[in-house]
Image (cartoon, rainbow, N blue to C red):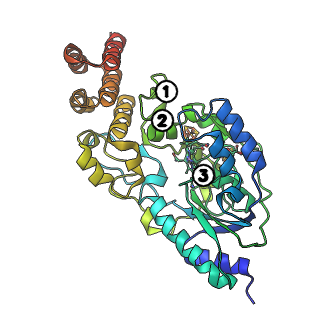
Amino acid sequence: MERIEDAVKRCAKELGFDLAGIASAEPFLRDERAAVERVRGGLMDGLPWYTEERVHRANHPELLLDDAKSVISLGVSYHTGEAEPGSPGPTGRVARYAWGDDYHDVIKAKLRRLAAQLPDLAGRPVRTRVFVDDGPMNDRAAAERAGIGWFGKNSNILTRSHGSWVFLAQVITDLDLDPDAPLAKTCGQCVICIDDCPTGAIVAPYVIDNRRCISFLTIELRGAIPRELRPLVGDWVFGCDICQDVCPVNRKAAESLEPAFRQRHDFGAPALIPLLDLDDAAFRERFRGSPIKRAKRAGLQRNVCVALGNIGDPSAVPALSAALRSPDALVREHAAWALGRIGGPEASAELQSALASEGDAAVTREIEASLAEMV
Ligand code: B12
Ligand code: SF4
Ligand code: SF4
């Protein structure tokens, strides 16, 4: 007779989860302590919803579901090959996880179907609560305990079969299942990701300073990207994969079998100049059902300006000059910075002319700083 633990994992695989393991629902005390310390030390600043109260709940599954006994921890690969660059003109980079359909929608549907199968497998009613990066649950701590993978020094969970290119998801349940053992694996002496992170955001093994992480700066941050960090953002316009691209464990990562995560349009390496033309309706239309919509139109255009400034291609000057007249001060400010980086008489004339009519203090300061740096 098939053990219920094996039946749960079989059903998970049939639903398209690449990885499945079981953890007890005991609190994640080491992770709670570490996360509280980081909130207090300011390393999670910029994410107002990431509070000590949330940390407490996220690391106590028994607070998320009455009588929680086990956590079924799941992983789905999003490694779908290499990016197809868009054209014409300069292109940016988007983190792999955002090349296809929104993973929340794709994985939530699978989680609900798995949860719906549990009463049949158990022969009794089963209480469940499902999570996929959409609530107070510590996804990585559960995956580590369930033996899905181990914490890399870049703080991502690395798996033997699919590297770190996996989304993590959970079903918390009142079923008392036999837990799997955590893997006895570590990064050993490797520190490549720490050395290669362009902003120095991996401040110690397993510790990210959210405020310096390009993923935060290009996705979650709503205001201006700090001036000193802009050159370090490179051509990333949504998220960042550098600490995963350089990881040796990812060299052998199996590819994703999930068609929904394949690259839409040119989302892996988008042509940048057309993105500056989008108004709110066109942005909504282009990014409907894509994780990229989270950046919002002004946030994405802010990132596009920074990437164009870093790429330094003078063919972007007319589009950036048009962005200097954007209704959003945030976009105007970053367009001014980018024109200053690209330089040249045309960029200088556009900045001079914008200065005469600019009404926003932050944008005015940015134009003045850019002009001063050009001479
Ligand atoms: C907040 C958040 C972010 C923030 C903060 C990043 C961070 N490191 O926490 C930002 C916006 C920057 C971000 C970026 C990314 N994120 Co994010 N993010 C989250 C979220 C919502 C919470 C994570 C969290 O609690 N962080 C708080 C800190 C304290 O935790 P931590 O960094 O994981 O550190 C742990 C270890 O240090 C451990 N620890 C403590 N002491 C010790 C000692 C030892 C020896 C060890 C081994 C461990 C250890 O305890 C800490 C707490 O668990 C989760 C979803 C969720 N609900 O869990 C997704 C999640 C972590 N993100 C995810 C992804 C994909 C990303 C990006 C790769 C996206 C991208 N390409 O741009 C980047 C990766 C950046 C990076 N290197 O971490 C995935 C990770 C999948 C995986 N394989 O690990 C998750 C799990 C979402 C999901 N369900 O799939 N993210
Ligand atoms: S996602 Fe990019 S910026 Fe963030 S820690 Fe990794 S390499 Fe550094
Ligand atoms: S690059 Fe090296 S240190 Fe960083 S996560 Fe990969 S194996 Fe670990």
Whether ligand 1 has any atom under 8 Å from the Cβ at mark 3 is answered as yes
Mark earlier in primary sequence (2, 3): 3
From the image, which quarter does the N terminus lie in? bottom right
The circle on residue 217 is 2
Compared with 357, 272 (above or below) is below
Whether ligand 2 has any atom under 8 Å from the Cβ at mark 2 is answered as yes
Q: Secondary structure at mark 2?
A: helix
Compared with 40, 162 (above or below) is below
Q: Is 41 on the left or on the right of 335, as rendered?
A: right
Residue 121 at x, y percent in the picture? 66, 83
The circle on residue 301 is none
The 10 Å Cα crowd at callout 3, few under 14, some 14 to 19, many 20 or more, is many
The 10 Å Cα crowd at callout 2, few under 14, some 14 to 19, many 20 or more, is many
Kindly give the residue lying farthest to the bottom in the view shown: 1
Please identify the quarter of the rendering in which residue 225 is found: top left
Please identify the quarter of the rendering in which residue 72 is found: bottom right
Callout 2 amino acid = Leu
Callout 1 amino acid = Leu
Residue 221 at x, y percent in the picture? 46, 35
Circle 1 is placed at which residue position?
229
Q: Residue at x 47, y 25 (%)?
A: 226
From the image, which quarter does the C terminus lie in? top left
Q: Is 138 on the left or on the right of 101, as rendered?
A: right
Please identify the quarter of the rendering in which residue 305 is found: top left
Circle 3 is placed at which residue position?
136
Q: Secondary structure at mark 1?
A: loop
Mark earlier in primary sequence (1, 3): 3
In this orientation, which residue lies closer to the viewer: 318 or 369? 369
Callout 3 amino acid = Pro
- The mark closer to the camera, 2 or 3, is 3
In this orientation, which residue lies closer to the viewer: 373 or 103? 103
Residue 32 at x, y percent in the picture? 72, 45
